[in-house]
């Protein structure tokens, strides 16, 4: 019996680190990049994949319908309305789509009780987009998985994250960094790990088909769960010798004293104050990438890192 080959993939959000990593991992497969700008050439050399012009803010997909399975690392609050418009304007074209994999964020879980308006609005936008995607796909029985990764980091080609890279820049600027004890737990996931999970699910989703009993939402993390201070020390050790980030001293303070020092931030920036508070919170316990991929766990940090 001949097994079916990999389905064609239409990729949205190719100009993100995870999108660029997926292009690398899918080399040799049928893949088309949809977006406002043509994709970058692969980091390993060769021609970029075919390009499908598509503006998620204005297009409905009628001009050149996407094919195969849709994978999106674009902002989910832009992708979800676009998909709803496409399903409404071209039901036959959408019925031919073999599945949808969209990237959301674990912030929909970790920031759901936020007190500041910025994070509350973010959670609402994520939740509404996830609900819209679920309704759109369920209406035509299209299989869907929504990935909710936590703390994406790393570099793919010329594209790097804006999470841990900001922490490395902070370590380079400061002589010491106060922490609430060892801090809470983190489970950072490399952009390549996230892309590998999306590609793995892209191969399985058409075979699994639409099953309303299957969970749509998949909170996802890396293979290591580690305290905030340990994560920072490993980041320091992963930098080159002579890098200023190695010289920053991590100062573990009693949590109450740390919070007292951080209290003035509440008046200056409630958003920043809550971000500092989360340094002591456990934001882990998500499905590790290796459990889905079936391989050995990859210890943090996975290389390459963003500068």
Image (cartoon, rainbow, N blue to C red):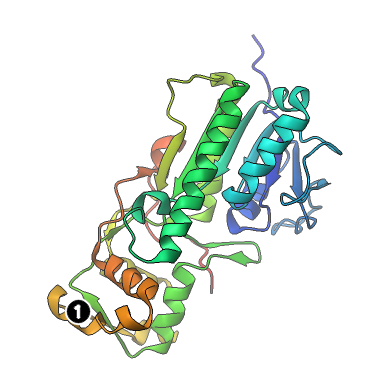
Q: Residue at x 54, y 44 (%)?
A: 129
What is the tally of numbered marks visible in this picture?
1
Residue 18 vs 162, above or below: the answer is above
Query: Viewer-proximal residue, 56 or 166?
Result: 56
Residue 157, compared with residue 192, is above or below; it is: below
Label 1 sits on residue: 258
Q: Above or below — where is 282 with respect to 92?
A: below
Where is residue 125 shown, x and y percent of the image? 51, 51
Res. 239 visible in picture = no
Residue 212, how many percent across, how many down?
47, 20
Would residue 199 appear left or right of 299 to someone viewing this image? Answer: right
Q: Quadrant of the N terminus?
A: top right
Say which residue appears at 29% left-offset and 54% top-offset.
225
- Where residue 89 sits, quadrant-wise, is top right
Q: Spot the residue most to the top.
A: 1
In what element is the residue under mark 1?
helix
Q: Residue at x 68, y 53 (%)?
A: 14
């Amino acid at each position: 019996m001949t097994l079916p080959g990999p389905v064609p993939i239409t990729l949205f959000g190719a100009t993100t680190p995870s999108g660029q990593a997926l292009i690398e991992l899918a080399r040799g497969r049928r893949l088309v990049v949809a977006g406002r700008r043509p994709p970058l050439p692969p980091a390993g050399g060769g021609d970029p994949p075919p390009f499908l012009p598509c503006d998620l803010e204005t297009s409905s997909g009628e001009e050149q319908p996407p094919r195969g399975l849709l994978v999106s690392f674009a902002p989910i609050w832009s992708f979800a309305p676009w998909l709803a418009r496409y399903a409404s304007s071209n039901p036959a074209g959408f019925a031919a789509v073999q599945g949808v994999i969209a990237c959301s964020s674990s912030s929909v879980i970790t920031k759901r009780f936020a007190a500041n308006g910025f994070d509350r609005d973010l959670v609402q936008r994520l939740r509404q987009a996830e609900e819209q995607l679920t309704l759109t796909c369920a209406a035509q029985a299209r299989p869907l998985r929504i990935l909710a990764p936590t703390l994406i980091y790393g570099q793919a080609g010329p594209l790097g994250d804006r999470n841990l890279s900001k922490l490395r820049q902070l370590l380079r600027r400061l002589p010491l960094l106060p922490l609430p004890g060892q801090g809470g737990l983190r489970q950072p996931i490399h952009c390549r790990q996230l892309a590998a999970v999306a590609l793995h699910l892209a191969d399985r989703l058409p075979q699994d088909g639409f099953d309303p009993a299957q969970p749509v939402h998949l909170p996802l993390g890396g293979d290591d769960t580690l305290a905030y201070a340990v994560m920072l020390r490993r980041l320091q050790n992963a930098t080159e010798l002579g890098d200023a980030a190695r010289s920053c001293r991590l100062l573990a303070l009693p949590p109450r004293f740390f919070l007292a020092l951080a209290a003035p931030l509440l008046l200056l920036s409630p958003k920043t104050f809550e971000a500092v508070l989360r340094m002591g919170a456990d934001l882990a316990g998500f499905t590790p990438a290796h459990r889905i991929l079936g391989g050995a766990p990859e210890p943090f940090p996975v290389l390459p890192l963003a500068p």
